[in-house]
Image (cartoon, coloured by chain):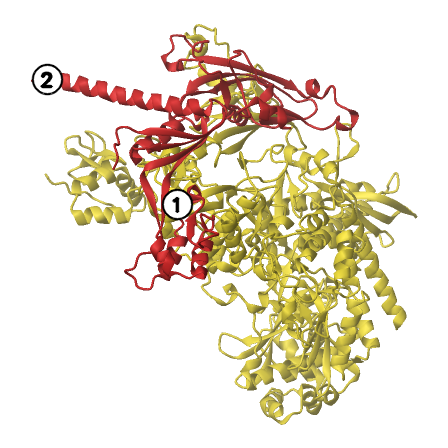
Chain colours: A yellow, B red
Amino acid sequence: MILGVKSRGDASKRRHDAGAEECSEAPPKSVKFAEGEESPPSMRNGHEQVKGVKDKWKLLPHFLQMRGLMRQHIDSFNYFCTTEIKKIVAAKSNCVVLSDSKADWFLEYTDVYIEEPSMFNEMGNVRDITPYECRLRDCTYQSPIKVNVRYTKGNNIIRKNGIVIGYLPIMLRSAMCHLTGKSEDQLAQMKECPYDPGGYFIVKGVEKVILMQEQLSKNRVIIELDNKGNVSANIQSSTHERKSRCAIHVKHGKVYLHHNTLGDDVPIVVFMKAMGVESDQEIVQLVGSEPHLVDAFGESIEEALAVGVMTQKQALKYIGRKMRNPKASLNRKQYKARNIPAEDEAREMLSSVVLSHIPCPNYNFRAKCVYTAHIVRRVLTTVLDPSSLDDKDYYGNKRLESAGQLISLLFEDLFKRFNGDLKRYADTCLAKQNHATPWDISGMLAGSMNITQGFIHAISTGNWVVKRFKMDRQGVTQVLSRLSYISCLGMMTRVDSQFQKERKVSGPRALQPSQWGMLCPADTPEGESCGLVKNLALLAHVTSDEEPEPLVRLCMDMGVEDVTALSGAEINAPDTYLVFMNGAIIGAHARPELFVRRLRFLRRQGMVGEFVSVYLHDVQRAVYIASDGGRVCRPLLVVENGQTLLTERHMAQLASGVRGLKDLLRIGVVEYVDVNEENNCLIALSDADLTERHTHLEVDPLTLLGVVAGLIPYPHHNQSPRNTYQCAMGKQAIGTIALNQYERIDGLLYTLVYPQKPMCKTRVIDLIHFDEVPAGQNSIIAVMSYSGYDIEDASVLNKGSIDRGFGRCMVFRKHQVALKTHPSGTSDSINGPPDPNNADLYPKGENDRGWKKYKALDKDGIAYVGAKLEKDTVIINKMTPVGTDISADRAAATKMREASLSYKTSSPSYVDKVMIASNEVENQFFKVLVRQVRRPEVGDKFSSRHGQKGVCGIIVPQADMPFSEMGICPDLIMNPHGFPSRMTVGKMIELIAGKAGVLHGHQAYGTAFGEEFGNADKVTDICQALVDRGFSYCGKDILMSGINGEPVLNYIFAGPVFYQKLKHMVMDKMHARARGPRATLTRQPTEGRSRDGGLRLGEMERDCLIGYGASALIMERLMISSDAFTAYVCEGCGLLGYQGWCQGCRRPDSMSSISVPYACKLLFQELQSMNIVPRLRLQEY
Amino acid sequence: MPNTRAPKIEVLELKADFVKFVLSDTDTSVANALRRVMIAEVPTMAIDLVTITENSSALQDEFLAHRLGLVPLRCEPGTKFVYNLDCDCEDNCEQCSVTLSLDVSWESKAAGRPDHEKDLPVFVTSSDLVSHDPRVGPVHFASSDIIDASQDDGIMLAKLSRGQRLQLTAVAKKGIAKEHAKWSPVCVATYQFDPIIKVADDVSATLTVAQRQQVVESCPVKVYGLDERTNNIVVRNRLECMYCDECTNVASSLKLRPEDDAVVTVTASQDRFIFSVETNGTIDADQVVQQALEALSLKLQTLRNELINVKQKILAAA
């Protein structure tokens, strides 16, 4: 037994080591941090010594170093690339391709592996590609999937290795990626940002994230009330071959089985009998012979009698009759045999479709019987005691499906289709007689693009279609938001729920207590998807699948008795606990507590995978062991006898790099605990709380929040929705998106000219290196009212500050155009600008109005770098042939017309970069990056980090701003009305902490829940620091009015607060129109700013005008200024006609003209087309 | 109130870049006018027009131009320029502007470096700006002594790495900070009201020493002290007072009856203003004050002339 365990342990060890190598190569950033910040908030004097380990938070950098920020995505993808893909290819149904035409022909895959991303260069050689190149050249960052095969060619068996069957898009920073393990310098050489988290794909130049999808866990029993109020146990079975859903529910006091393949509910006893448990006594024993259960189950037993089922054969026949589509469960070969008796079909269905995750080797139904009986037992117990209903929203019942799993589903499907194609091809080729040379399939293997295209299509559209599982999901992938570094991180931690957004239920949206430490309580959007889209907490990890078989063997060795060998009475004995492995019963154990303790001990020793969860459920008398993928778990410090196993020595070893966190995991000082296992834990928040009963200690309470909420200083002092608002706004803050931001050519990029690191930061800011890629500026704010232009959250900005660079930002926009080759054989071309000295065309030369639009062009017809672009300036002077299709005649094909790319926006820009490139799809394309520098103006949106957004209401000269006797005058004045109702005390503390920090020359800390742990400066210390520097302890100053020089009558709360400039700027939004384009159909003004549309006078505005009786104004707005039209109406027939002619009456003299909205005239005509005749009766008015 | 028409100035401290003086016998409006003019209306030279010939640095053209604009340019005292708008020339000329040029490449600066510094970036600073007019030039400290003493190599404009070059000419023009803060000659121009701190000795006598100590310690900036001999409260650092009301709050808490006099009272003097002016090096601090006063009187002059004009017009109309 021990041998088996050892080998398992070794395997896991090897995996650890591989991971460790990865990390040791990475720059020791976080180590530096741990040392550098030795003296955290410097102002805490007299900080009492906590018992146990001081500064637990210092573990955090090590956690982050060990797993990176986006481990959940990368781990799951790595698992696919290294393990899952091999399993899929090696699966019995996939690894061999046979032909119907020739019995001895075969193709067998012996291995499959994925190499590093590469592509063919111009010379046809393979070369490596970098993600940077892919982004710029609109390529896909993908690597070849290579297989080793054996196949028959003629009479020989041929082996071929390394055949490329397709390309797989590679996740950045995964094991296959070139970036993995590179130093900062190497990354800089590859023009990659060292802080980029990875975890996304680059497909056709677009960065795509596969969002984590939250689902109800598979293969688990969930007991809930159905919509009729009956107790129902739902089980979603999922195996590689089949997914099915099954319900065991109570109806009229009787228990039935419901399954989609069955047209009708089947009495549960019939189902049990069909599986070979014919004796009623045995059934009752399996379910449980406690009197109350027997009472509740009695009717169900009679039900079987009532339908006349006594034996297995009768039961199978009964079920066979109820089957909806008898052939569906059988595979094609059996289908061909056709005349199968109904009971055989039923038997087949019972074994492979119903509850398919419980295997029935050779139709041995025993395990499934026990399982069903157990479910029935739980259902009956629930009927008697509704308190044992399961909660669907409980997070232990959820699984997160991440990139690796989705890619694996897709790959399996694509691979099966690929094999299908091969087979079909082999069938036709082998069917032909008289081959000159023996037929070779290898060409076909390498030539197919289906797998490559399948991946690219799925990832770039987000449509995941797997017909086998009837899966057709939209929006699985999203374009990675690169608005700011934070928005990018926020997107990578996002968890999407499958729930429909329209449903107005609160359950799935509510914050579940079990989400503590797993999902961020603050970071969720407002509005329709509130609570459905969530974000992982800082240290939460999502597990990958792990082989259950060795675990099962281990359990058996540890005293779990095989359940198939036990009788019902033994199983349901009061001291027997059932042992479940990933939802299936593997046996029973008489001393579950000992068993659980031992199993956990083995896990802590690294003999069992670190993410295996062991959970003892006393009420259900069961031990649940889980090794499946998609569970959320988090690390905790192990506590024994009221003491953490973590010691100062460990901390020192970590700091010096002697030991890594992996080692602590391996020796059981730290362990990962999933949501279910947390139920068996008593977790202390801090060392001070530890008692003998505690089993674990939180690493740090700040890990309860996610990455985005981690930016907020003192969030625990804020009203909770404010933190939620900040989470949404932090993603819109302009700043730095990455260190390579100026090397990138994004569609739209906002950057701040002078981003600053916040004066008041948090530990999370250190962890994610926000100081290196900040988004915002420290502005001195004064909380006072000023000028009246600051009401309703508007703020007053200092013109002097703006002149000096406050809030100054740059906007980059990409313009792209490709030169196409047309079917007519001609292709687009680029011409230089026309000659301005051509006096016929341009009498005024270069200043001529007609020529002006070419002034940005270089001789080659592309705008030069640094050129100023105004509205309608040509950026690329592209020409395209008049006739492009195949049938175009020679003259049309050679004649060129202008199809230039011109600058559309009204505010001018400058050309920043011009790129010319080609890829597999386009033979030449151009990207022109255009830049604009903007200074803040009235109407631009700003926000602090506390959900306090506001627009700039007025910009005031520096001389007019209030000033202190030291000469300090604020950059921004905030209205005090922003505080009372919002209760953002955190902002006030940020202000005084920042002020103290400024005076002492260091960044202050304001980590969530940090005062107790030395992660946040305490207000008392801050006040002391202020007083030490001659400031008022409450952060208030005396200010003088800049306008009249008198002192302001109150003390003004003033100091530095980190302000974010948000992406919403008036320049992009302001819009007005007098005249302009109209829609063709209705002749009404177009809609929207982008189409230079009109401003709508809507229904409610119309109602006001009606109420006012302003009829002339209504007439003007709704008709004259919109779509007035003079129509001619025949007074004879009342139909529309021409001026001076009625086609209906065929006479000219009866026409009168009326002025109607064109839409009205259109309506009449449309009605006419539907055989409804609207006749107008005209009257003198 | 004393004679507000005869204000006095008493200089407390004078350095090249800093002046502290007391303006007395006038009222707030005058003091504030002086402050506002110093901030916004004393003309200086600042780069206003940048022609970039080559910029292969990491910074964008506009970014650089903005940085250049904020570089303070020192004018020799007595140098007079006219405003570009008032000048007769077409674009700009020596009367209204100064041309500066900058041409730095990594190669040119990194040439003489030791090997271990070979790959480090080259700093382009304000000292690389070459002025075409000897009277005007970039400055980063007020006095040459500090410049010599500091390690600072000028105001950082950009960093260049291998192969990068920055070549540009910049035109500095005369202007005032009303238009753009880059023309402001001052970093700090502020005043405080001279505090009048009164210790009521008779009330003090009724207090215990501990209570007096309490009053003394209440002040965060240590304005008060206890006389060693008599243990009476005395005012030690009057000018440090920041009107925080801490002492008066304590004093009022020590009152036996609400109508009693407090032991200390702090009031702001309405006619004495302590000015602090720190320049950014473009003009000497005393010059800033003088030019501000000139500008102020010029404004008043203009107003007076306008008034006379208006009056004459009215008379003529009548």
Callout 2 secondary element:
helix
Between B63 and A1163, the residue placed more toward the observer is: B63
Query: Is residue B7 placed above or below A1033 in the rendered structure?
Result: above
Crowdedness near tag 2: few (<14), some (14–19) or many (≥20) residues, C-alpha within 10 Å? few
Callout 1 secondary element:
strand
* Residue beneath disc 2: B315
Residue A759 location, quadrant: top right
Q: Quadrant of the N terminus of chain A?
A: bottom right
Q: Position of residue A579 (x, y in %)?
A: 73, 77
Q: Quadrant of the C terminus of chain A?
A: top left
Task: Count the numbered circles shown.
Answer: 2
Whether residue A54 is visible: yes
Task: Say which residue appears at 56% left-offset and 85% top-offset.
Answer: A385
Task: Say which residue appears at 68% left-offset and 26% top-offset.
Answer: B161
Q: Position of residue A1004 (x, y in %)?
A: 57, 49
Q: Position of residue A745 (x, y in %)?
A: 59, 33
Between A1091 and B309, the residue placed more toward the observer is: B309
Horizontal relation, residue A613 to residue A914: left or right: right
Task: Say which residue appears at 60% left-offset and 22% top-offset.
Answer: A827
* Residue beneath disc 1: A1038
Task: Say which residue appears at 46% left-offset and 42% top-offset.
Answer: A780
Query: Is residue A504 placed above or below A971 in the rendered structure?
Result: below
Q: Position of residue A737 (x, y in %)?
A: 58, 40
Q: Which residue is at the far right?
A: A156
